[in-house]
Amino acid sequence: MKLRLVAFGILFGLFSCKSSNDNKDNLSTSSPDGKLNVELNLNASGEPYYTVKSNNKTIIDTSYFGFEFTNAKPIKDNLKVIHVKTDSYSETWEMPWGEQRLVENNYKFIEVDFEETVAPNRKFSVVFKVYNDGIGFRYEFPEQENWVEALIKDEHTQFNLTEDYKTFWIPGDWDIYEHLYSTTKLSEIDARSYIPKTNLAQSYIPENAVNTPVTMVGKDGTHLSFHEAALVDYSGMTLKVDSLNLSLKSNLVGSENTEYKVKRSLPFNTPWRTIQITENAPDLINSNLIVNLNEPNKLGDVSWFKPMKYTGVWWEMHLGKSSWDYGMEMVEGKWTDTGKAHGKHGATTENVKNFIDFSAKNNIGGVLVEGWNTGWERWIGFEDREGVFDFVTTYPDYDLDEVTSYAKEKGVEIIMHHETSAATQTYEKQQDTAYALMQKYGMHAVKSGYVGKIIPKGEYHHGQYMVNQYNNAAIKAAEYEVAVNAHEPIKATGLRRTYPNIISREGLRGQEFNAWSGDGGNPPEHLSIVAFTRMLAGPIDFTPGIFNIKFDEYREDNQVNTTIAQQLALYVVIYGPVQMAADLVEHYEANPEPLQFIKDVGVDWEESIVLNGEIGDFVTIARKERETGNWFIGGITDENARDIEVDFSFLEDNQNYEARIYKDGKDAHWDNNPLDIDIANYDVNVTSKLKIHLAQGGGFAISLHKK
Ligand code: NOJ
Ligand code: CA
């Protein structure tokens, strides 16, 4: 019966929908379980505000909202309520790929329509959806006489908090999210004095603001995370910090080229402003609020994209073993081989074949090839980047025909790479040709990159212009059955539900910083914060799996700051439908035992359960592979060693599993002894419990195969 209901829900989208009312005196609604409550109101000047309570405790106190425009008076006061609608909704929908297959989407909502009591009597609405694990709200601007276009100078949405929360934040950079998280009290956030110790190709932090998701923990264990959902044709939102009043306020990313930050024709809706509200840290990860607030799949069947692990010509460039560029010269506007090849070029036919062989042997579906196309000689640091990269012309030592047919023979897919160098017009012009080339060769995934300051000058990575660039590229790619994994992206806001070819993205300090950053790389606590901040937004292309932790033969001053067991754990802890096995083939071949885990681990999940965790300290996640029903578990810790008990009560009854456990060795330590790993087999079932010791900067990974 349950199964049939589920099928019905997917088909028809709707389980229940209670009818609306029009009671203008009661502007409130609650979550389906009654624990969260939202109330709206107007003050004596007709200014609208809202409050949020959780278990009767005020989480968001009187918080006003409104808009400023460059072509009209602000909308903020002299408003009256003209209509109210409340409703509830319940459905179960299916993810084509994901951290779980079925997603429940249950909420109550309230829509309040406002109108100005004075000329020009403009109208707008606010809609709140209240879930058991948080809220989302957005503004809707209906079609109306005398108002055709909104030039938004800024959106003023307040989030007035009632406690000086412990906050995990990155600065409100308009250009990049690749910063280390700081942990401070809300009142102590100081984003302007945050100076990255690493040279970033782009960075602009104009205000004391933070980027989202920003996550907080209260004294009574309340967990909050602020973000946004369905960021479409609008600017990214940073949150400005008012330390004195313990308040956050929306501060949209702007442009140097226009006075307004967003330009929209009416009718339009803003993205959803979201607050996840849970009683513990694991439930933040368990929450589906962000994807649920996005519209259903508009692409239909995307089975041409298969979630996969991949290797690639990548880490070797970051280590300096090989290079992206070949050593060509620009002659009369054309990249030409003038005999200056330096011999370090990485993307050669031979090297790629080596990765293909390795992937084929190790149950890894893809090979990423960076540096295959002309243009890399004029990349980072060059002002003039339009017309430089070309997304169809290979370097002379890379034979696309040969490589793709060899890969096909071996059952491996080549992953395309498009480094746009943030020269957006060059990329836009070539997209059709570039994606058509991929289609011709049967390539279904592209990693794109946007390193450097945006051209046209004056635009920022997170403003409306770029939001449209990223979204339009993905929508166009879908026409060619191409899925996109963007680096230097706009943040994830759950659009993968609507466009399931948006598979993954960077948008954080990834593994690459361990190869070259001048600030010691990612500290051991990094990913135990990321799991509860950046990861709440959506899939991450972190590129785990570095076995040669110290890589002294390449860079003596850099290293990965985790144990090898933690590198394995990341395949389960960090979710993404494409997961790189990032290290060099020779480093894997030298370590066949831990490699077995990468070979076995799944990448597409029926179900995920966060077993335990505290933000910035540790986290353990179990995931069940869709195809096989095998389970995989990953656990990581910060710079502190700790003992974790894994309770296997989530396993199926009456089923025995062979568990292979990869854990830190007795003397393991992220810095002194990162390669010490213990690998052992156990029989487990639903009644089993297992104590595991995690070293400083360590972790563990478990594969559970049905017996
Ligand atoms: C930055 C990306 O994060 C990295 O993965 C890539 O190798 C380089 N850009 C080159 O595109
Ligand atoms: Ca990057």
Image (cartoon, rainbow, N blue to C red):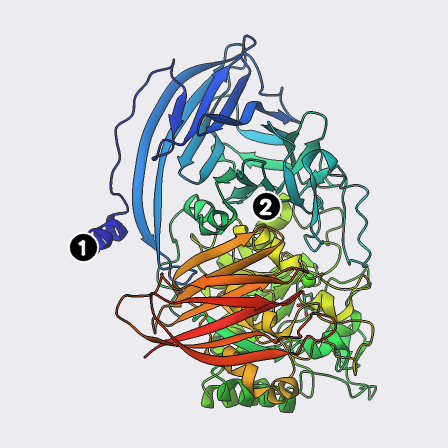
Asked where in the image residue 357 lies, by quadrant, the reply is bottom right
Q: Identity of the amino acid at label 1? A: Arg
CA–CA distance in space, label 2 to label 1: 37 Å
The residue wearing badge 2 is: 213
In this rendering, the answer to whether 356 lies above or below 218 is below
In the rendered image, residue 254, in percent from the top left (x then y), is placed at: 69, 39
Binning the other alpha carbons within 10 Å of mark 1 as few (below 14), some (14 to 19) or many (20 upward) gives few
In this rendering, the answer to whether 11 lies above or below 225 is below
* Frontmost residue, 203 versus 117: 203
Compared across the picture, whether 601 is left or right of 457 comes to: left
The residue wearing badge 1 is: 4
- Is disc 2 placed on a helix, strand or loop? loop
In this rendering, the answer to whether 488 lies above or below 57 is below
Residue at image location 51% in from the left, 60% down from the top: 620
In the rendered image, residue 11, in percent from the top left (x then y), is placed at: 25, 52
Binning the other alpha carbons within 10 Å of mark 2 as few (below 14), some (14 to 19) or many (20 upward) gives many
Compared across the picture, whether 689 is left or right of 517 comes to: left
**For the C terminus, which image quadrant?**
bottom left
Compared across the picture, whether 74 is left or right of 300 comes to: right
In the rendered image, residue 543, in percent from the top left (x then y), is placed at: 61, 69
Asked where in the image residue 113 lies, by quadrant, the reply is top left
**Label located before the other in sequence (2 or 1):** 1
Q: In the image, ligand 1 is in what quadrant?
A: bottom right
The answer to whether residue 433 is visible is: no
The answer to whether residue 385 is visible is: yes
Q: Is mark 1 within 8 Å of ligand 1?
A: no
